[in-house]
Amino acid sequence: MRTQVAIIGAGPAGLLLSHLLHLNGIESVVLESRTRADIEATIRAGVLEQGSMHTLVEAGVGERMRKEGALHHGFELAFDGKRHRVDLLELTGKAITVYPQHEVIIDLVAARIAAQGQLLFETSEVAIHDIGSARPSVSFVHKGESRRIDADFVVGCDGFHGVSRQMIPHSLRQDFQRTYPFGWFGILVESAPSSEELIYARHERGFALVSTRSPTVQRLYLQCDPHDRVDQWSDDRIWSELHARLDNQDGWQVKEGRIFQKNVIGMRSFVCAPMRSGRLFLAGDAAHIVPPTGAKGMNLAISDVRLLAAALDGFYRQGRWEALDSYSEIALQRVWRAEYFSWWMTRLLHTFPDATPFERELQLAELRNVVSSRALRTALAENYVGAF
Ligand code: FAD
Ligand code: DHB
């Protein structure tokens, strides 16, 4: 098989890249290790920045998002039993959309299939070859058969645990990493929304987040031990912890309902630099991870591939290497800003097991500063909506 761009991984990064290339008349093949049903059902991110929404709409895959996604003009910070609104629209002129990642995946897969794009599910033994030459290739097994794709470029969109990043020799790359001493326990609940807007809550018992999925399904998270197992959290334990962390002095309470999905999410910050070696480029979680507090992961994946698709277009249209050569440096500038913001939000809102009483008071003082200063709220809002 021969193609122009071989893409590994059918997450938001791989699928959107393949679609953007197609719109520019560039051929690609996407290899995915899981089944279509599996990628379309995995519950992950929920927040799309305005720039990400715009990219999806421009690419012709934003129709359902516009209809079914919920546009949010602000969110709330909760601490000391009180809530404080951050008015994104007023502070930045921008908004975000709550639209689940698996719905983005469903829309992108449908668009790739409608355009007769090559999307191979359940591939295994994926290996990348000759990235230092002008003819890189990818070998893999599909439906019991060993196959190979020759390509001009290979793009690793295979997430944090994929094979692509490992192709960049340790001597040429630097990995930056921090793991956090807590995780998030995520649930999906059948109930009406507890709140019109997202609530990020800081509490001595740990962080909690109220998000939403639809008028009848809600998404809630609470800080937990990163080694917790789902079976250690009964429904009663979850509700009593959520009430303790979220219910406030005005009598507002989080709404209960049937919990139909539970998962534990580890938290880390990670950056691999550079995001390229020879004819191999990395995009999305394959190159960087942020803790979910800033809602940046899927948005970074989208901005990486927007940049890379334009660079590949410059190459195929005009034979220009400049944008491909500067891809890693430019992408990493945005990545580091998102890393900084995600780390800052995480530090501001979580209970660190080793924090001294002095550090806990500083955290509260910082929160009070943020909600009382328009300048600090503006900086927070600009970062949250991705206005950089
Ligand atoms: P992935 O989505 O991980 O896709 C990689 C794909 O590659 C997978 O389908 C995988 O099966 C496939 N793959 C892996 N290895 C191979 C291989 N060897 N061969 C073939 N295929 C392979 N981000 C936000 O922007 N906003 C949020 O609100 C947000 N909330 C989050 C909440 C949670 C609970 C979690 C876990 C994450 C959240 N994120 C959020 C992060 C976001 O989900 C990720 O950043 C995003 O999925 C990255 O997309 P990707 O395409 O780079 O990687
Ligand atoms: C959601 C996830 C996040 O990480 C976040 O910061 C906000 C919302 C969500 O899944 O809805």
Image (tube, rainbow, N blue to C red):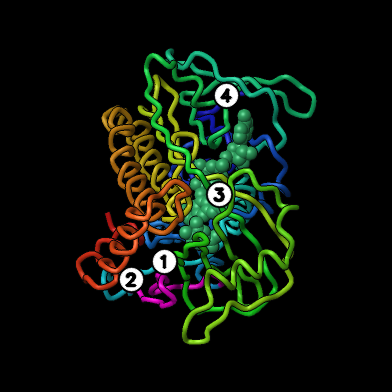
Q: Residue at x 36, y 76 (%)?
A: 85
Image spot of residue 300 (x, y percent): 41, 47
The three-letter amino acid code for the residue at tag 1 is Ile
Q: Tags 3 and 2 in contact by the CB under 8 Å rule?
A: no
| Residue named by callout 2 | 88
Q: Is residue 4 magenta?
A: no
Tag shown at residue 283: none
Classify mark 2 as within 8 Å of ligand 2 or not, answering yes or no.
no
Secondary structure found at label 2: helix
Labels 3, 2: front one = 3
Graded by Cα atoms within 10 Å as few (under 14), some (14 to 19) or many (20 or more), the crowding at tag 1 reads many
Q: Is residue 162 left or right of residue 365?
A: right
Secondary structure found at label 3: strand
Secondary structure found at label 4: loop
**Distance between mark 1 and mark 2 Cα atoms:** 8 Å
Q: Residue at x 69, y 21 (%)?
A: 147
Residue that lies at the very extreme toward the right in this rendered image? 144
**Distance between mark 4 and mark 1 Cα atoms:** 39 Å
Graded by Cα atoms within 10 Å as few (under 14), some (14 to 19) or many (20 or more), the crowding at tag 3 reads many
| On-image quarter of the C terminus | bottom left
Q: Earlier in the sequence, mark 3 or mark 2?
A: 2
Q: Earlier in the sequence, mark 3 or mark 4?
A: 4
Q: Which residues are magenta?
A: 68-86
The three-letter amino acid code for the residue at tag 4 is Arg
